[in-house]
Amino acid sequence: MSTQVTITIDGAEITAAVGQTIIEAADAAGVYIPRLCHKPGLDAFGGCRVCTVTANGRPCSACTQPVMPGMIVQNDTEKLRDFRKTLVEMMFVEGNHFCMFCEKSGGCELQALGYRMGIDVPRFPFLFPKRDVDASHPDILVDHNRCILCARCIRTSRDVDGKQVFDFVGRGAHKRVAVRTGTRLADSDAEVSDAAVEACPVGALLKKRVGYTTPIGARRYDHEPIGSDIENGEEN
Amino acid sequence: MAKPRIATTSLCGCFGCHMSLLDIDERILALAELVDFDRSPIDDIKHISQRCRVGLIEGGCANEENVEVLREFRRNCDILVSVGDCATTGGLPALRNLVPLQECLEEAYVHGPSVHNPSGEIPNDPEIPLLLNKVYPAHEVVKVDYHLPGCPPSADTLWAALNALLADEPVQLPYELIKYD
């Protein structure tokens, strides 16, 4: 049995390996599909839906759908672009994202998607939910105001660090990331060297005392849109 | 032909966006050639005197006076532009949206660590504009035509937007001019 399949993304044929997901095949071929919860090295999650494409006409998350021989994928269409933009705008209004004083600004993947998609203002009313900040840990700050529930910290702590520091509690609008061992991060075995701290795409998990180290103009997404590394064929 | 008129105001903002407008440096001379300024903190005209082509709104709405000024701008400007994060999202003043208004006032005037107020009275003079329950971005109060995010939007962003508007073209900002910080 062949280990290679051919699929098309927006009409261009690419070769993919059997067992790859659409997003992995697209990354390898230099085609960027926007994403937030997907992170190479972690199991597919399919939570944020930002990577939604259509495969043979049917919408699916590119990070969970394996490639199939002859699959026809639509990625960069007006309808899908607007769908993704809507999702990102919803994330901006359902949390409290004060970019102007956030330490992650310039390196934040949510913000970078807003820039890439050309979002000047979300089309929905801001909700201003009441969320907590957990500064109990000596070296790590948890700010739930910025959390987008991508589960990258949960999955990284469990699958990379082997610790299970975090998990989800609650459902629907009440869903949030919690510390498994108690109510405060200080009561867990989380350490600042954990990969989970680096895994956060936004400013919800931050190392203390290292903020604002990169000057404005030299930050990751100041000049190059998110996804440029993939489109330029650089492995991230 | 009369020059197009521009009006500007700072509602619940810090005047940082107006500072950014001044930061267009010598291009402000070219701007002065192109437009006449109507109501603006720059010339201290208190009310819009005649129909304006463009109204620039800095700051969100935190009190009833902000709403009144914003409505005056909407009535008298062909194109209304939200300038900066406070006008587009509520910005820093919107941090108070996470705390009930009564608690905010009590912290500011009664319980704050540096407050000396034996009577415990919270200012309530009819001359003082009443605070709104929350801080609102401009487009949640009136129709806004364009949004320039940034804290503040850079001088280049403001210059690009003004140039497009004065040329009767839609504002389309390139990647490096859309910033939220």
Image (cartoon, coloured by chain):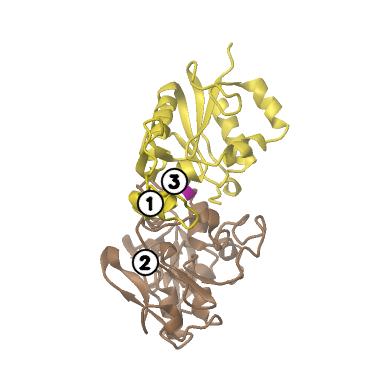
Chain colours: A brown, B yellow
**Disc 3 versus disc 1: nearer the observer:** 1
Disc sitting over residue B12 in the figure: none
For marks 3 and 1, give the CA distance. 22 Å
Q: Crowding at label 2, few (<14), some or many (≥20) Cα neighbours within 10 Å?
A: many
Disc sitting over residue A61 in the figure: 2
**Disc 1 versus disc 2: nearer the observer:** 1
User: Is the residue A1 above or below the residue B34 in the image?
Assistant: below
Q: Crowding at label 3, few (<14), some or many (≥20) Cα neighbours within 10 Å?
A: many
Say which of A72 and B116 sits in front. B116
Label 1 in the same subunit as label 2 = no
Residue A34 x %, y %: 46, 61
The answer to whether residue A86 is visible is no
Residue B155 x %, y %: 64, 40
**Disc 2 versus disc 3: nearer the observer:** 3
Question: Label 1 is found on which chain of the structure?
Answer: B
Q: Name the residue located 50 percent from the left edge and 48 percent from the top edge.
A: A118
Q: Check disc 3 and report its element: helix, strand or loop.
A: loop
Question: Label 3 is found on which chain of the structure?
Answer: B
**Which amino acid, by three-letter code, is at mark 1?**
Glu
For marks 1 and 2, give the CA distance. 49 Å
Q: Name the residue located 59 percent from the left edge and 72 percent from the top edge.
A: A235
* Residue B97 forms part of the magenta stretch: no
Q: Earlier in the sequence, mark 3 or mark 1?
A: 3
Q: Crowding at label 1, few (<14), some or many (≥20) Cα neighbours within 10 Å?
A: some
The residue that disc 3 covers is: B90
Disc sitting over residue B106 in the figure: 1
Residue A216 x %, y %: 65, 56
